[in-house]
Image (cartoon, rainbow, N blue to C red):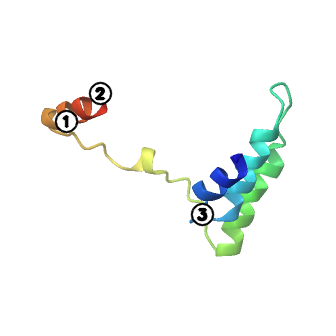
């Protein structure tokens, strides 16, 4: 059942994401992750697709947009 859900979650994204999630889920709490392996999954994906890492992430390069208070009221009331 768990694998079916992971397959559904990762359906439209590269396979490296499901491989990464499977790997991290099977780690024991005290087990040291193989960071080189994990990093290699994504650097390999980038190389395969010809992507370059510019270290310009969404959360560091874009300015935050202030939303009106009414937006927050709607979100709070809908989430309860």
Q: Is residue 29 above or below residue 67?
A: above
Q: Does residue 69 lie above or below 34 as drawn?
A: above
Q: Residue at x 49, y 51 (%)?
A: 57
Instruction: Please report the residue visible at 44 percent of the width from the left and 51 percent of the height from the top.
Output: 58
Q: Is residue 42 left or right of residue 31?
A: left
Please give the residue where the numbered disc 1 appears in the rendered image.
74
> Which residue is pictured at 71% across the width and 60% down the height?
16
Mark 2: give few (<14), some (14-19) or many (20+) Cα within 10 Å. Answer: few
Residue 40: percent from left, percent from top = 78, 56
As drawn, the label of residue 11 is 3
Question: x, y (%) of residue 11?
Answer: 60, 63
- Please tell me whether residue 32 is drawn above or below residue 40 in the rendered image: above
Q: Secondary structure at mark 2?
A: loop
User: Is 69 left or right of 79, judged from the image as shown?
Assistant: left
**Quadrant of the image occupied by residue 76:** top left
Report the label total.
3
- Residue that mark 2 sits on: 80
Q: Nearer the viewer, residue 8 or 42?
A: 8
Q: Name the element at disc 1.
A: helix
68 or 25, which lies in front? 25
Local packing at callout 1 (Cα closer than 10 Å; few below 14, some 14-19, many 20+) is few
Is tag 3's residue or tag 1's residue first in the polypeptide sequence?
Answer: 3
Task: Decide which of 45, 73 is in the foreground and name it.
Answer: 73
Q: Answer with mark 3 or mark 2, whichever residue precedes in sequence.
A: 3
């Amino acid at each position: 059942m768990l694998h079916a859900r992971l397959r559904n979650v990762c359906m439209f994204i590269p396979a490296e994401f499901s491989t990464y999630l499977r790997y991290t889920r099977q780690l024991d709490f005290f087990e040291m992750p193989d960071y080189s392996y994990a990093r290699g999954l994504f650097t390999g994906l980038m190389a395969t697709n010809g992507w370059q890492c510019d270290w310009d992430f969404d959360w560091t390069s874009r300015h935050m947009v202030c939303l009106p208070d009414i937006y927050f009221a709607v979100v709070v009331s809908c989430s309860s």
